[in-house]
Structures are given as C-alpha cells and as structure tokens.
Image (cartoon, rainbow, N blue to C red):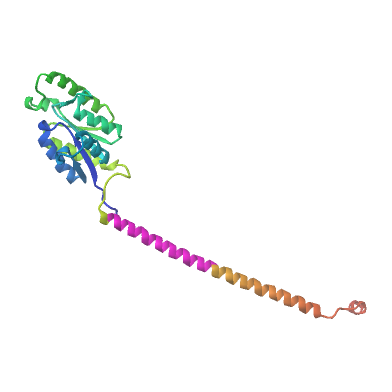
Amino acid sequence: MSAKRMFSLFISSTYEDLREERQAIMGVALESSFIPVGMEQFHAAPVTQWDVITRMIDECDFYLLMIGGRYGSIDAAAGISYTEKEYEYAKQRNTPVLALIKDPHSITGDKTDFGDDKYEKQKKLDEFRERVKSDGNTVDFYKDLNGLKYAASQTLRKAVDYARQDAGWVRYADVAAVINKKVKERELAASELVSDRETILKDIHEALHTFEDRLQTIEDRELTWGDLPIASEDDVKRLFE
C-alpha cells in the first residue's frame, strides 16, 4: 500500500471581507488531503511580515488565491496590494496557483473597498482579476459560501492529479514502512546474488574437474599407445598377401 501524501496550501486573500470564506477553505482543504497555511495562524516573530509570507509560500506545494470584492491594502513601494504581491511571488517561484474568484455581481457593498481611494482600488481589483484569469492558472468561480466550498473541493481534487512527484508530505510511519520494504527487497536480491555466485563457482569447479579428468585420460592414452609394438615391413606384406 502506497503512502498517502498530504499537500501544503498557502491561502492568500484580503482578510476582513473574506473571513468566512477563509474558514470554509480551511475545512475543505483538510478534507481534501491538504494542509492549509494562512497568516492568521502565525503570531509576531523577529522578522518582517513579508519574510514570513515568502518563507511560507516557499514551503507550500500550492498557492490558493481568493478574490472577493476588495483589492486590499497597497504596498507603497510595490504600488500593488499585498495580496497581488503574494501572487506575483508565487508565480515567480513557479508554485502552482489555484484561484477562486467571486462573481462581482454577488458582492455586496459592505464587502468592497472604502475610503478616498476606493475607485482606484476597484480599478486595480478589476485588472488583477482579469490578469489572474488569463495567466495560465487553475481558476474556478463562486457566488456564495456553499458555491465556494463546492468549487474549492473540485479545484483541490484536480490539483492532486497533477502535483509534482516530489511534492507533498507523508507520515513518518509510512516513510519507514517504504524504507523497510526496500531494505528487505535489497537483502533478498543480495541473498539471491550470493546464491547465484555460489552456483556459478560450483559449475566452474565441476567443469574444471571434468576437463582435468579428460586431460588425464588423453595423457594416459598417449602413454599406452607409446608402449604398443611397431609393425615391421614384412608384417605389413604378410597382411595383404
């Protein structure tokens, strides 16, 4: 029985407007052999938040992006939202991207950006959404929480089928079982090799012994022929008379 792999999944999205969706994704991920990773699971650390994010993306097998009605806080240096910045980093790392996009017509006003720059953010959100859809990612759509769960389940199930061979995590017990099986197979192969070598050596020994016996027989015959009397010319003439 082969070991069952679990895949780590970094969940990226704006937070306040998609709080329920993030919780739902956590549950679906666990049911689908994925280990969900989100920033809400980490406390303050002696490194910058971006360092923590990039480290987590590096260690995850998949990157799941959810796009709702908010573009989110913008990184002044990059000129894009932190969510889009995470997305760009995942693409640069060639981490498989799974995207779940909420139907804009299903988004209520309280789930959109607010403030003086809300129109600028809305434009950036529209551009980001279109970019993700046309960027070679696995993309699914949803309208509500139940639709999200269904879409996420289908997305994660398909993702397992094309996961890299070196991706995923397995239990130590499963790894030990595989190693022990390989060790036993090698020990058996080594034992069979030793047995084959012994058989070959035995065959060679018997062949050499047979050759020695035949050689001795030939030598004995030569000695016997040398002792035979030689016929004279008169003996030959009498034979043919």
What residue sits 58% from the left and 68% below the top?
204
Q: Quadrant of residue 21?
A: top left
The quadrant in which the N terminus is found is bottom left
Residue 168 sits above or below residue 115 on the image: below
Quarter of the image with the C terminus in it = bottom right
Q: Main secondary structure of the magenta part?
A: helix
Magenta stretch bounds: 174-200
> Relative to 131, is 109 on the left or the right?
left
Residue lying at 11% horizontally and 27% vertically, measured from the top left: 106
Percent position of residue 112, x then y: 10, 25
Residue 173: horizontal and vertical position, in percent?
Answer: 26, 57
- Outermost residue toward the front? 46
Foreground: 55 or 184? 55
Dividing the picture into quadrants, the one containing residue 156 is top left
- Residue 188: x and y in percent read 40, 63
Camera-nearest residue between 87 and 127:
87
